[in-house]
Each structure stands twice: as C-alpha cells, then as structure tokens.
Image: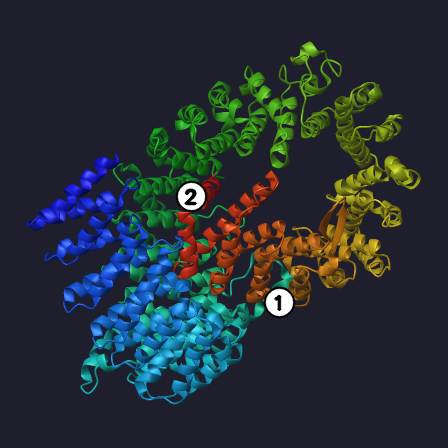
Amino acid sequence: MASHQYHQIANLLEKMTSTDKDFRFMATNDLMTELQKDSIILDDESEKKVVRMVLKLLEDKNGEVQNLAVKCLGPLVNKVKEIQVETIVDSLCANMMSNTEQLRDISSIGLKTVIAELPQSSNSLAPNVCQRITGKLSTAIEKEDVSVKLESLDILADLLSRFGEFLVPFHSTILKALMPQLASSRQAVRKRTIVALSFLLIQANSNAYNGVIDHLLDGLENPPNPAAIRTYIQCLASICRQAGHRLCNHIDRSMLLLSQYSQRDDDELREFCLQACEAFVMRCPDAINPHIPMILELCLNYITYDPNYNYETDDGDTGNAMDTEDDEYVDSEEYSDDDDMSWKVRRAAAKCLEVLISTRQELVEDFYRSLSPALIARFKEREENVKSDIFHAYVALLKNTRLTDDVANDHDSMDQVSGPTSLLIEQLPLIVKAIQPLMREKSMKTRQDCFLLLRELLNSLPGALGPYLDSIVPGISYSLNDKSSTSNMKIESLGFLYSLLQGHPPHVFHPHIPLLVPLVVTSVFDPFYKIATEALLVLQQLVKVIRPLEPNAAKSDFDAPSFVGQVYSCTLQKLKVTDVDQEVKERAIACMGQIIANMGDMLQNELAVCLPIFMERLKNEVTRLSSVKALTLIAASSLRIDLTPILHDVLPALGTFLRKNHRALKLHSLDLINKIVINYSSNFEANLLQTAIVEIPPLISDSDLHVAQYSLTLLSTVARRQPQALVGIHEQFLRSVLILVRSPLLQGSALNCTLELFQALVQTQLSGLDYHSLVSKLMAPVLGGNGDVKSRATAGAPSEVVQLHKQAYHSSAKCIAALTQQCPQVATPLATKLITDLQKRNDTEIIFCLLTIGEIGRHFDLSSIQVLPQTIIECFGATSEDVKAAASHALGAVSVGSLQTYLPLILHEIEVQPKRQYLLLHSLKEVISSLSVSPSGLAQLLPSVPSIWDQLFKHCECSEEGSRNVVAECLGKLVLVNPDELLPQLQQALRSESATMRTVVVSSVKFTISDQPQPIDVLLKQNIGEFLFALRDPEPQVRRVALVAFNSAVHNKPSLVRDLLPTLLPWLYSETKVKSELIREVEMGPFKHTVDDGLDIRKAAFECMYTLLEQGLDRVDVMQFLDHVQAGLCDHYDIKMLTYLMTARLAILCPDKVLLRLDQFIQQLRDTCTHKVKANSVKQEYEKQDELKRSALRAVSALSQIPKANKNQQLVDFLKSIKETPELNKIFEYIQKDSITGSSDIIVMDQS
C-alpha cells in the first residue's frame, strides 16, 4: 500500500515539472486529493520532495496553478513533520519580502492558510512556528513598503487570534512594532494595527495591557493630530470588544474623554465615540453604570442629529413626504447626499441605544419615560439603514416588556410590572400613528421592520391592536397588493396578519373582512409556494374569524354567508390540484377541514364534492396525516356535519393506519375514531367500527403510554356509545389491558383512563365483561385461584402466580375499587372476604389485599367490618417493610370513607404506639391528602382539624427524622384546610428555641405552595417572608429546609417571593460557598476521611438558583448570578453537574451576558474535560468523570450556539481540540446529534 502511494506521488511530482500548464494543474489537483486522505503516509524523502515542489509551484507563472498550490498547503501542514512545516514557513516569510507583487500576495495567502490549519493540540509545532513567524512579521511591519506592512499586520492578527498564548513571550517585540503604526498616515494600516493590537491584549499581562490603554488615553488627552483622536478611540472600542473585562479600571477616564470629544464638530469622531460607548456598555456592564445617564443623553441627542434636512415639512402631510423626498434633494444645488455623514452618527446612536436597552432590564420603566417617545418620534428617519436600527432598538425595548405567564395570570402581582406595561399602553396610539405611513413606504426593509415591531408589540401586549385596525389593515393591504413587493415582504405581511387574527377576538375584524378576504384569496393563488402556504394558514384563521364557533364568541350581525362561497371555492381549487408543493397540499387540506367544521351547515350541497376528496387524500401516504387532522376538526365540530357519504370508507382506512409505524398518525387516527364514535355512533353499524378497533390491542402497551392512553379512551367511548362493537373482540384487548395494569409505569392520566375503561366495560353487561369476571381477572395474577370471587377456571388466568412490581398492586387495587363503585352491593362482602384469613396469606397477597381494601374503603364505609382496623394495625408488626407500608396506606384510605370511625383511632394509636408512629403518621397523611382536594372532603375534615393539629404538634420534635418529615407534610397540607387560623400558629412556632421544631415548621411551608391558585395564596404572600428569613438561622439544617421551601415557591408560584428577591438573594448566594467550619475529618481505621456537612445546603442553594433561571431571572442581577455559577463549576461532583445544566440554560436565556464571561466558562469546562482519573481509582470514579465530561460537553455545545460565540478564540480553540481528541469528539458529536433529534421529537409531540 505504502509503496503504491510513494510511486503515485513520485509520478505526480514528475508531472508538476512539465512545461504544459494543464499537466501541472492536474498533477497539483491530484496531489491535493491525495493529501486530503487520512490514509496517506509519507517518508522523510517524499515529504521533502513534496514540500519543495509545492513551494516551487507557488512561483509558477500560471495563476491557477499557484492558487491550487496554496490550497495544498492546508492539508500538507497536517501530513508532514515539524521540520518541513518550518521550511514552508521560512520560505513563505522570505517570499513576502520579495519585490514581485504577485509572489508577495500568494505567499501571504499561503501563510494565512498554514496558520489556519496548524494543529493546536501538538506539543511543539505551533509554538515553534509562532516563534519563527513573529520576528519576521515584526520586522516586515516596520518596513516602509505599505503592501508588505498590510499583509504582515493581517497575518499577525490571524496568528494572535489563534495562538495568542504562544506569543506571550514576544509581546514586547510585537508591541514595539505595532504601537508606531497607530500613527501611520495610511488609514488601512491603522485599522489593521487596531485589530492585531486587540487580539494581542486578550493574553497580555496587566503591565502591557495597562501600558497600551494609558498610551491611548494619554494620546487622547494630548492628541498629536485629529486623525490620532479617531484612531485611539477606535482602538479603545476594539480592545473593549475583545478584552473588555480588563478595561473596567479605565472606564471613568475613558468616558470623560469621550464625552468631551463627542461634542466636537466632526461627524466621524462622533460616530467612533458612540461606537466606543456601545462597546463599554456591552463589555463593562458594572463599571459603566455611573455613566449610563450621560450615554443615554448623548444617544438621544445624536439620534436626532440631521443638520442637512428639515423634517418639519413632513409633519404637515407625512403620508406624501416619502414620495416627494427625491425631488427635494434634487432642488438643493449646494448640498449633496454624498457629503452627508450625519446618518452614520444617528446609526451609531441607535445601535448604542439598542445595546443599552438589551443589557439594562432594570431601567425599562425609565426607558419608557425618557427614551420611548424619542424613538417613536424618530420612526420618520429618512435614511433606511438608520431607520432599521431605530426599529430594532424599539423592538429590544418591547422584548424587555414581555409579561411572564406567571405575572400575567396573577392579579396580585400585576402592580409589579404595570409600570412599563401601562406606559406602553399609553404610548400605543403614538406608535401606531408613527408606523401607519411607514407601512406604505416604497422601502421593503422599512415595511418589514414595521411588521417586526408590530409583531413584537403583540407579544408584549396581546390583543392590544384591536382599536387600531383601521390604521394597520391598509398597510397590510398595501404590501400584499404592491406588485413590487418581494416574496419575503408578502410572507412577512401574511405572517403578521396571522398573528393579528390569532391574538384578537373575531368581532374586531368583522368591519375589515370585505377587504381581507380578497387579499388573502389572491395570495393563495400566488405562484410561489411559500406565499400560497402562508396565505392558506391565514385563510384558515380567517375562517374562525368569519364564523367563530366558540361558546364565548360575542354575538354580532356580521353577514358571514356572503364570504363562505369565496373562501370555499378558492380552497377547493387548491385542494383539487395534485402537482403542487407538499406544504401547499397539507395547508389546503387543513384549511378545507376548518371551512367544513365552521361553515359546513352553509355548504350542504358542496359536501358531496368535497368529502370524497378528503377520502382520496386519506389514501395517499403523503397527505394522510393532514387528512386525519382535518377530518378530526370536522368530526368534532358542533355543527354535526353529515359525514355519512364517507364514514364507511374512513373507519376501515383508520384501522389500517393503527398498524403503521407512524406515531403521530396513530395518535390522530385514534382521536378521530373517538370523535366519530362520540358524535356519529348512530350513523353506522357496530361491525364497521370493529374493523378499526380490532387493531387496538397491540397499541395498549407501556412502551408508549401516550398512545395507550388514547386507545383506552377510545375503548371507553365505544363501551358507552356502541358496546355491541366489543362483542367477540373484548378478550384480545382485555388481555393487553391486564398486562398494562401490571406495568410499573402505569400511573397518572393513563391509569385514570384504565379505571374509566373498567367502569365503562362493566356497564355494558356483555358476556365475559361482568363484575365477577373482571375482578377475577385482576386478582388472578396475585391470588391465583384462592382469591376469588369465582373460580380460577372462570377467570381464564394461568394457574401460577406472577411476580409483580409493587406499583402493579396499587394499579390492580384501584381497578377493582373502580369496578366496585359500579356495583356498590358487593363492596362490603368483597372487603370482608379479603380481610378474612389475611394472616395466613404470603406477603405479596397481604400487600394486594390491604391495598384493595384501602381503595374500596376510600369510596365506601367499611366500619361494619368489626375486625378491619385491628387486622390492619396488626400488619404494622410484619417483618416486610412493603407490608407495613401497604397497611399504613390501607388504614389511611379506609379512614377517608369512614372518617368518624377511623380518624379518632389513628390519633389515639399515634399517642399510645410510639414504635408505630411513622406508619400511623403516613396513614394520617393519606387522610389529609385525600380529603383536602375536594369541597365535600374539606367539609368532612374541618371539624377534626384541631385534634389532628394538636396531635401533630406533639410530634414535631420526635427523634426519628422520617417521622418529622411526615409531620411537616401533614402540617402543611392541614394549613390549606383552614389557613386563617393555622398559619399564624405556624408562625408562632417559628420562634421556638428548638432547632428541630423550626426545621419542621419551615419544611411544612413547602407543602402549602402549589402551582394552582389556592385560597391561602394572599395570606401566604403576606407572611412567607417570615418563614424564608430562616435562611439566616444559625442551624444549617433549618437553612437547608428554608432553601427547599424557597425553591418550591420560585418553582410553583414565583409571585409569592418576587418582591423578596432583593433581600433573599444575598443569603441564597452565601449558601453556595464552601464553609470551612462545616468540614470535618473522620478517622476510619488508619485512614482519614473528609466529610463536608455543608454539601447538602450548597446543593439546595444551587437547585434554587437553577429554578430561578426558569422563573425569576427578570429580578436577578445576571452578572452576580454568573459569578456564583462559575464558582460552582469548581465544586463537588453533584454541584458541578447542576452548574453545567445552568450554564447550558443561561446560554439560551441571556446569551449576551454569558458571552461576556465566556473565557472563564471555557477555562473551567476545559479543565473538567481534560482531567485524568488516577490510574488506581475505582470503577465509580471513572464513571463519575465520564458523566462530568458528558455534562460539560453539553454545556459547551449550548455555549457554541450563542450568536457571535464563534468569534471567541478560546471557544474556537477548545472546539478544535475536542475534534482532535477522539474520545471527546465521539461524545460531543453524539450530544449535538441528540440535541437535534430531541428538538424534532418535541415538534412531533406538539403535533400529536
């Protein structure tokens, strides 16, 4: 293989010496192909020959050959040894000094290629190359030849950006060469010097950094010439963008100079001053704080700076101003637009304002007062690009005004955000008035910006544009009718119209329907498929507006029938066409589905034409899912559209879809069959329905509980509406249902659907679905033939008893109780049967019987069974923990059905049985949890609350932590029953001297907070601070439970703690620090083991911070938050895992702020990924390190998605080193692939 390669390369080298340029070109091309192969191996002699030849070809007379030779350098650098790379670099550096311009150019391109391809992971190659190049570049920079100087500065900037750390020893040499260039007479030289200098200062030591900054600031204080002022300010801004965090100490001095120079009558200088301010605001957020008012004033001053244009002429008739604009400029002879640089000043001011708004969320209300009116007034800006930047600044302001869902839905907290929102509402007429003429401008960009702003306005103030439709609709009409409008313009207009229709009540559009319908219909027939697709989406929404079916839709006199024909015929034409884009087909089907669902009663004669087309689309693999969704809309319609013509074909087709390996299709097909059975069961025979439901048994499986849930719901509907369809097939699906009941995964809504199915089945009174048969089938896997209500043979169950997961006993017990609810007369006999001879059964049988008795007792009064309580309590003494837990659950559950009998017994037993206290408390918790969820349960529980409360308080300080936790939960849930009386008592207990008592009381508050509105909420909001101030408690255990309660409040009901965050956050952050007083050493034989008692508190603190990310970040100082996240990156394994998750989340929530700290994040993530486990470590250590690496790389993947993150050199270098490390690269690729498929899975779930 190797000899073949050598021969082939020797052959290519020979051809490269040919006099024929085509031979040389082809040979060079083939060489590049060979070099790009991973398998190529060159010996020393071949390397020398190839390098020599490629360098020779750089001087080739043919330009195309030269270009190919340069391209060869990239792969060549990675294939040859270090000495050959040095040869390449030396030769290219020498050629750069050549007198031949073409050779100089090609050599500089070659050097850039080599620098870009140099591997960063190699030990000595990159540093050696840097050392060789640096000196020569520094010399070249100092030469007089400008072209050499420019190329050298370019290459040096590349070198510094990629290998900055290797060049640190040469900084003094480089600086010596660069600093004089800032005074060059050539602007291009000065600009490239600034770029190189900015990259250099990222890695420079403090002395060098401060030296350069001082040089610049001294130069600004005593400028040698006007050009130097501009250069130094540009340089400051550029340095700030690259290494801004180090500029903080110089901000005050810099801002003083900028404020002076910004007043000079020099447009270019003003622009640079504003750009520097923008960089300072972005990169030095804390240091710039005192100067924000000055920057704001400067921007507001210069955003209106337009000395050469009189806007007052526009105010009379804004609508015509833009049309006559060109003529006005032509009339002016002494002035030309080419001389006007003021637009750059206004643009810089607008961009600075955008950054200011984006990064200063706490000033939003002030911005609405001072800044918003000024921006609205500047919407009339004449320069298109500046106007766009002004719009984007206002959009940034609107984004910061968005209401969080929690605040929007919580009336108590509305006052906290009403400031910005109410100011925006006040300014809404001004915004619409300013935008109205701009929506009819010739400029596409301006119109698109108008729609962008209006759409953001809808996000900030949903439904607020209704009163202004008279001003907005003509603008939409203009863009859709304008023949010069681009495709993007039309798509943007339609997209906004869709958002508008979606976000407002239908009646506000009724006056505009005569204008909107023809507009949208015309767009539907647009030849460009993307416009047609968007138009059909809008048309579908328009149908809901023309004829709303919602029960709460306002009554109106609107004449809907006059538009039905136009909308229907337009959609029908699109529906009939088959040779169109897939998206158009799908949208046409969906639109027609909406039309029939909302207007079908007005289209009776058309249904015979339209419905068969749906049937055709249903048979087509490409359009079947869209057709199922559309038919679901029709079948669910309150108009009860006559589907008889197609029902006999639809149901069998849906049955075949249930066999397909297409999850979304199965879900929508099940939903459609369900809707058909609910609304049309009288229109078809049972045997037709059987063709579909016969396919259901394989779908009832715990491998996909969502599909199983839909299947169970459908069977329940069939059992209630058309039970005859189950005859002959119930055995098949019942077998699947019984297997599902035994699944450890069955819980929640899927379990509720199973219970409903059993109740529906027993009501059918079909053979084999009677009460005794179903109960026998449920009992057989546990009790075999012994437990039965009928014989084992009748049950049709296998004779052996199956070993089940404990969740299966709970599920089976609930199913038996659900069946018993339909046959109340057998409740007491069945419970008696199960309790008899309980002690003679084995543990699994006892568990099952206890759980079943409990579930039956939850719905029926079993107090007539005398032996019941004592038998259950005797099970508390069993050896099996599972039996004890089942007995505890059963006692609580039967107490729910007979509170007067069993509650006093539980309270008495808690008092006299200290050893069984934990189990009895669990029983009490079951009683409180079950009864506190319904009004009738609360009425039963209320009289007993004082006695329960007293009993619980007696056990707040019991020795067992488990019992204390249950007491805390019971106290919390009991407070919800009678908050006005019990919450003050809880507050009183908070003052106890006992740390244990305080722990239980604070812990109980967590259970008073739920994500649903509760009567206690108002009271809790007033008093929760007192409980959370336990974060200052001297006892670590109390602080830990206070953090858990804080976390619960932030997660479930942020409005409770929103106002307290300024007080609570410093205490929260203090708990994230490692505290030496909580670290102790434990001797274990000859070894000493370090125990950190503060670890649990820190974990609770970081968990709380993670929750804050989701809910309360708008009230948090993000930069301070980031400090503590970064500290956590160096903490214990558990905390590192949490902070990696937080890093990934922060990258999405506040990318701009994270970008400022990217270097620090990358350094800590790099340390984790490159950490090596000691050779003699145990297996768990390796597994932990692997998990850390995976989590760290997930964080890296999220950071790499931040816009502009690819300009951060540390991140770029780290990503490259990941790709060059096979172990890390494999994990990283998997993570990236997983994130893509994860997001697509989410989309599928949304569809279903």
**Which residue appears at 50% of the width and 33% of the height?**
671
> In the displayed structure, would residue 493 be above or below residue 426?
above
Real-space CA distance between mark 2 and mark 1, rounded to the nearest whole angstrom:
55 Å
Looking at the image, which is closer to me, 26 or 342? 26
The tag on residue 415 is 1
Indicate the quadrant containing the N terminus: top left, top right, bottom left or bottom right: top left
Kind of element beneath mark 2: helix
What residue occupies the far right of the structure in this picture?
912
The tag on residue 1232 is none
Q: Position of residue 160 (x, y in %)?
A: 36, 65
> Which residue bears the numbered disc 2?
1222
Q: Position of residue 608 (x, y in %)?
A: 35, 32
In which quarter of the view is residue 83 placed?
A: bottom left
Residue 382 visible to an observer of this rendering: yes
Kind of element beneath mark 1: helix
Q: In the shown orientation, is residue 64 left or right of residue 672?
A: left
**Which residue appears at 56% of the width and 18% of the height?**
732
- The label nearer to you, 2 versus 1, is 2
Callout 1 amino acid: Asp
Looking at the image, which is closer to me, 40 or 1236? 40
In which quarter of the view is residue 885 placed?
A: top right
Q: In the shown orientation, is residue 72 left or right of residue 897?
A: left
Q: Position of residue 654 (x, y in %)?
A: 43, 27
**Which residue appears at 86% of the width and 35% of the height?**
902
> In the displayed structure, would residue 763 be above or below residue 1212?
above
What residue occupies the far top of the structure in this picture?
793
Query: Crowdedness of circle 1 by 10 Å Cα count: few (<14), some, many (20+)?
Result: few
Callout 2 amino acid: Pro
The first of marks 2 and 1 along the sequence is 1
Q: In the shown orientation, is residue 1091 left or right of residue 716?
A: right
What residue occupies the far front of the structure in this picture?
45
Looking at the image, which is closer to me, 746 or 711? 746
